[in-house]
Amino acid sequence: MHRCNLVSRNPRTTDDSDLQNPGGFVISLDFELHWGIRDHCSVNRYRENLLGVRKAVPAMLQLFEQYGIHATWATVGFLFFTNIDDLKAAIPSELPQYHQPRLDPYAALAEVGRNEDEDPFHFAPTLIRKILASEGQEVATHTLSHFYALAPGPTMESFQADIRGAKFAASQFDVVLKSIVFPRNQMSRQHIRICAEEGLIAYRSTEADPLTQTGSGAIGRARRLADAYLEIGGDGCVTPSLDTEYNIVKVSQSRFLRPWNATFKAFEAMRIRRICESMSEAARSGKTFHLWWHPHNFGSHLDENMKVLTRIVEHFAHLKRDLGWRSLTMAEVAENLLSVRRPDCLA
């Protein structure tokens, strides 16, 4: 006679509803400071926003704690280091050889200050510690160097070296990286394979946000702007999925949370309603709604941006209370999906 037990591959996840529906309300933040914009924007040009991150991150963490929001902070690995000497000592042996010199962050290290006090635009260990000290927050990777995966020049070997460098940088804070957000959403099947081989279990993709593919021209930008207020690109509701080849989960992005803009303040109610209606649809249908932005987007007009975010998380609290919708990090989504139970039959 045989006895068949259900054994979870992840002992921390035991709720059947978690296994059946890995979705929920996902927030991911591309935490990059100047590393993410240095190829097209100087520190002086964006100084207010970059310095404003020092107030924006604690404000967001406080709000997340108040409403039980779990969030993924995809962090550029360079930000973990306490000083320039430690950063230089951790430079991978295989570097990306960009055909466009302006993309190369290693060439810019000569212009970086000594530490976070001297250069708050390129180091952020104190902010990372604040994130780690906050309940429900995941520190993920945005690659070590804000790596442009599809730019001409870099090899797969240099990408793998970059990911390993990101893992080392995070390990100094006892962080085991589980999720990745690719800079500028640049990725290929080969990059996803490498991430899975390096132990990452979740990545953010763009399939649920079709207007990201409309290009950077005037028409594409106009369509994306209009979609923030009117339903042009769909509701953005998605179902995370396990890759067919690799042990990694795709957590598609739904919508970029645009920063508050005085030019469009008369339409703020429309923008918030657009997001909240999509959240409601995701909660009713058992799907995921994945909102993302950069902390530096809140660096100026912090009060106005926080009011918008408060409205959104208040709506989440309503959906959690009435429909049982959950707030999840990217890693939690992946862990739930990877924890599908298997029968363990014993004689």
Image: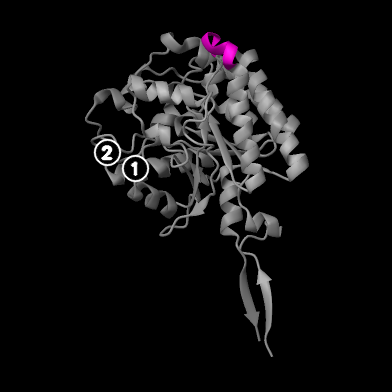
Indicate yes or no whether the magenta region holds residue 258: no
Residues 303 and 176: in front is: 303
- Tell me if residue 242 comes above or below residue 117 in the rendering: below
Main SS category, magenta section: helix
Asked whether residue 58 appears in the rendered view, the answer is: no
Residue 11 in percent (x, y) is at 67, 60
Q: How is the image coloured?
A: one colour
Q: CA distance from mark 2 to mark 1?
A: 7 Å
Which residue is depicted at the point 70% across and 37% down? 135
- Tell me if residue 249 comes above or below residue 106 in the rendering: below
Kindly identify which residue carries mark 1: 159
Which residue is depicted at the point 53% across and 32% down? 292
Instruction: Give the secondary structure at mark 2.
Output: loop
Q: Earlier in the sequence, mark 2 or mark 1?
A: 2
Which stretch appears magenta?
Answer: 261-267
Check disc 2 and give the amino acid type.
Pro
Kindly identify which residue carries mark 2: 154
Residues 102 and 329: in front is: 329
Within 10 Å of the Cα at label 2, are there few (<14), some (14-19), or many (20+) other Cα atoms? Answer: some
Check disc 1 and give the amino acid type.
Phe
